[in-house]
Image (cartoon, grey):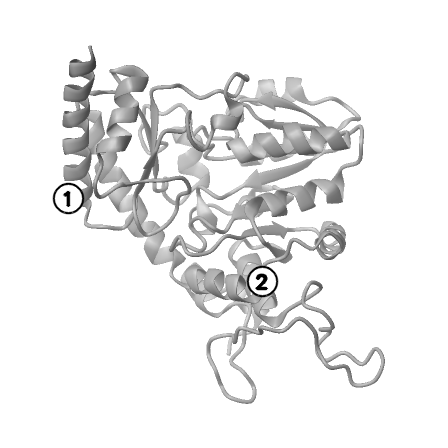
């Protein structure tokens, strides 16, 4: 077998996705990691640990395989698997911040991330300032010299798909003595590797594209510095919000097909975008792959492709946006994203309800699509009938 070092630095992405993190079982030859459904491990005498395992909060072989795999995909030094993306975020913040510290966050951050910083971390003494990730000068102005410990970035952002220049933001953060953390959930490790562009840590909701099948909740962190890895590892064990063995196994299985799935997500999203651009009921289409998108040039430089997430605004305002969401049949009305099935949602009333009334509030006429891997003609036909019926519904209400 190819060594772990070769996986990380010589093999292609798909090869690493399938092989990194686990060697076939020495006794049976099993090519897939077992699910180690155990809480504790027999010791060969006091302190005589087999492979370093003593208790599954501290370490589990199935979780170890996932952590090694995602570290290889992100080209980092060490990976950590958690019970959710928010558990990963909270553990990272508690690893690097102390009461009185300051964090810069996106001004269109995921609602759960905003809630974590505004309602949980604030009570712990961590303050935050929002800034548009696409505006380097605005991020610079939001940084408080001597206080800012983290610049937190989503790119693309959720749900407005803004793009941050990772390399420039990393330089800016480091000049201020801060870490750059990139939420890479929307892009996935297949389309973007922020650590190679200077980021210090990458966070994922592995519930999304990494797992890919809407059957598991999880999160991950990957870091490029061993000192930071040691701090995160300590807090992961101390806080204990780790991925269970079955969840780790499902996520690892999903990562093996990440590359082929992402290519299909992107193919389908591009076709959906082309359709929406020509529809009379659509006011604006937001997708980094469009040359008209203000972040297109940066996205082209740092992403392999532009992803499976599409947002658009409708001409009939919030009533029409809600009607479209209620009329689809192939697109499922639901929160989350990144699964094989297509999802539609109204961010203002669903995933981003927690930012209503704040500077991070999203437009009321915005619809977010997670474009799945179904037959794309079926997806377009579904949107066509939903948009048509929504126009009729709004006309009747008028």
**Label 2: how many residues lie within 10 Å, few (<14), some (14-19) or many (20+)?**
many
Q: Quadrant of residue 325?
A: top left
In this rendered view, identify the residue nearer to me: 345 or 5.
345
**Label 1: how many residues lie within 10 Å, few (<14), some (14-19) or many (20+)?**
few
Q: Residue furthest right?
A: 46
Q: Is residue 48 visible?
A: yes
Counting from the top left corner in percent of width and height, residue 299 is at: 42, 35
Residue 81 against residue 195 in the figure, above or below: below
The residue at 55%/60% (across/down) is 72
Residue 156 against residue 72 in the figure, above or below: above
Q: Label 2's element?
A: loop
Q: Earlier in the sequence, mark 2 or mark 1?
A: 2
In this rendered view, identify the residue nearer to me: 327 or 179.
327
Q: Is residue 268 left or right of residue 91?
A: left
Residue 32 against residue 118 in the figure, above or below: below
Counting from the top left corner in percent of width and height, residue 290 is at: 31, 29
Residue 73 against residue 32 in the figure, above or below: above
Q: Quadrant of residue 277?
A: top left
User: Residue at label 2?
Assistant: 244
Counting from the top left corner in percent of width and height, residue 15 is at: 43, 66
User: Residue at label 1?
Assistant: 377
Q: Residue furthest bottom?
A: 27
Counting from the top left corner in percent of width and height, residue 143 is at: 69, 23
Q: Quadrant of residue 349?
A: top left
For marks 2 and 1, give the one nearer the viewer.
2
Q: Is residue 284 visible?
A: no
The residue at 18%/31% (across/down) is 386
Identify the image quadrant of the C terminus: top left
């Amino acid at each position: 077998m190819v060594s772990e070092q070769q996986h990380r630095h010589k093999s292609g992405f798909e090869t690493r996705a399938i092989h990194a993190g686990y060697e076939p079982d020495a006794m049976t030859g099993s090519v897939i990691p077992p699910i180690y459904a155990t809480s504790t491990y027999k010791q060969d005498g006091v302190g005589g640990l087999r492979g370093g395992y003593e208790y599954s909060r501290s370490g589990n072989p199935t979780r170890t395989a996932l952590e090694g795999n995602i570290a290889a995909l992100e080209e980092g030094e060490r990976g950590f698997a958690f019970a959710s993306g928010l558990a990963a975020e909270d553990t990272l913040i508690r690893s690097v911040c102390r009461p009185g510290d300051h964090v810069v966050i996106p001004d269109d951050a995921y609602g759960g991330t905003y809630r974590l910083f505004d309602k949980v971390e604030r009570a712990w003494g961590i303050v935050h300032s929002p800034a548009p990730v696409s505006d380097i000068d605005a991020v610079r102005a939001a940084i408080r010299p001597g206080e800012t410990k983290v610049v937190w970035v989503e790119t693309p952002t959720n749900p407005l798909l803004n793009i941050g220049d990772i390399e420039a933001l990393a330089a800016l953060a480091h000049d201020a003595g801060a870490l750059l953390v990139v939420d890479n959930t929307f892009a996935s490790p297949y389309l973007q590797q922020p650590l190679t562009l200077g980021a210090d840590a990458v966070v994922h909701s592995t519930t999304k594209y990494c797992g890919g099948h809407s059957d598991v909740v999880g999160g991950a962190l990957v870091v490029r510095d061993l000192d930071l890895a040691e701090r995160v590892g300590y807090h992961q064990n101390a806080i204990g919000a780790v991925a269970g063995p079955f969840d780790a196994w499902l996520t690892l299985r999903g990562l093996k097909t990440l590359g082929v799935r992402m290519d299909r997500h992107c193919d389908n999203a591009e076709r959906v975008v082309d359709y929406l651009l020509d529809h009379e009921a659509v006011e604006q289409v937001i997708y980094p792959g469009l040359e008209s998108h203000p972040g297109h040039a940066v996205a082209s430089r740092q992403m392999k492709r532009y992803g499976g997430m599409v947002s658009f605004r409708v001409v009939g305002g919030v009533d029409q946006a809600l009607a479209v969401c209620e009329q689809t049949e192939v697109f499922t009305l639901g929160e989350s994203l990144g699964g094989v099935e297509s999802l539609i949602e109204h961010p203002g009333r669903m995933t981003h309800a927690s930012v209503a009334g704040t500077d991070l509030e999203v437009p009321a006429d915005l619809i977010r699509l997670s474009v799945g891997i179904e037959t794309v003609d079926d997806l377009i036909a579904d949107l066509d009938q939903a948009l048509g019926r929504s126009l009729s519904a709004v006309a009747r209400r008028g």
